[in-house]
Amino acid sequence: MNAVEVLEVTKRYKKGAVAVDGASFTVEQGAAFGLLGPIGAGKTSIINMLLSFIKPTAGTIKIFDREVATQFHEVQNRIGYLPERPGFYGNFSAEKNLRIFASLSGVREERDERIAKLFTIAGLEGKEKDLVRAYSLGDRKRLGIAAAMLNEPELLILDEPSTGLDPQGRRDIMALIHELNVHDVTLFLATHNVRDIAEICDVLATIQSGRVAAPTTTKGFIATVRGTTVQLEADVANMNERVLQAIKSVKGVKSIECERLKISLDYRPGINEDVNYIITRAGGRLRSMRESPSLEEAYVRMMGEERVE
């Protein structure tokens, strides 16, 4: 069964502004699906239609085989939602906030036990009694995920989950989201951050100016857009011709500079590990690795080219 089906969906706002233009894609149940595009591309409009906050101008949306336009009430309790900036009552404790959200979601049985479990899952143990106004943005995101999971949803929709977080906060949130997917929660992640997609999603579709491209595997997408050249630097104390020839024999090695052992590679999966194995066997160590261009640079370049077309 598909968790989400979007068929030829268009959304026009007043004065004819087109936010989504004939979008079609599906999300298999249990998958981690990414919708990747720049700010203003139409991602949030799609999320708002999935959640029945707004109606499409044309087209059909189904969640778990139910049409959102007429049967959303049959599936709404199977869906969790994390907005970009979760809203809470700042003068209430985090625990009281979750109790309020549980009541709104109709969660009554084993409510307190479920809330306690979610504080543990979200990594907020010991902060249950803290006022939410004292929470960092990262903790608010964690609390937002806990609130979204109160009804034990089968589909979790996330809008820009890592926006505004520092590197450590982003890593923590990504690890938490990945763990949820491991437990068979279907993820729908909308973001402009290509790294988030690369770390979490199995399948993705790009969106640009309201137009959604055909979904592809994340691995295939990365292989298409990422840099074709990788620069490695290594320290090898006992460099000799045998080690150099072993490195040169690795398929995809373009060139070697012996000073500080700079190696230029044509990207292919596993090539860094192949070269690093030879360096390690020679008693050396890999010092650095740099994609040229980086994944982010390649993605921005690709989206820029699509915009021109």
Image (spheres, rainbow, N blue to C red):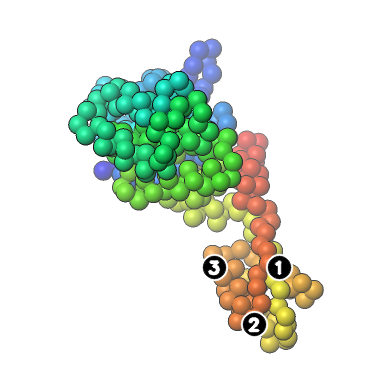
Earlier along the polypeptide chain: callout 1 or callout 2?
1
| Image quadrant in which you'd find residue 165 | top right
Residue at the location (48% across, 19% down)?
A: 12
Residues packed near mark 3 inside 10 Å, few (<14), some (14 to 19) or many (20 plus): few
Q: Which residue is mark 2?
A: 282
Q: Residue 236: x percent and y percent?
A: 70, 78
Inspect the image, locate mark 2, and give the three-letter code of the amino acid beneath it. Ala
Is any part of residue 58 visible from this angle? no
| Residue at x 64%, y 65% (from the top left corner) | 266
Question: Which of 248 and 58 lies nearest the eye of the viewer?
Answer: 248
Task: Tell me which residue sits at (52%, 47%) in the image.
Answer: 171
Where 114 falls versus 9 (above or below)? below
Q: How far apart are the alpha carbons under marks 1 and 2?
A: 15 Å
User: Which secondary structure lies at badge 3?
Assistant: loop
Q: Which residue is mark 1?
A: 233
Which residue position is annotated with label 3? 270
Q: Say whether residue 150 is left or right of residue 288.
A: left
Q: Earlier in the sequence, mark 3 or mark 2?
A: 3
- At a point 43% along the width and 36% down the height, the residue shown is 127
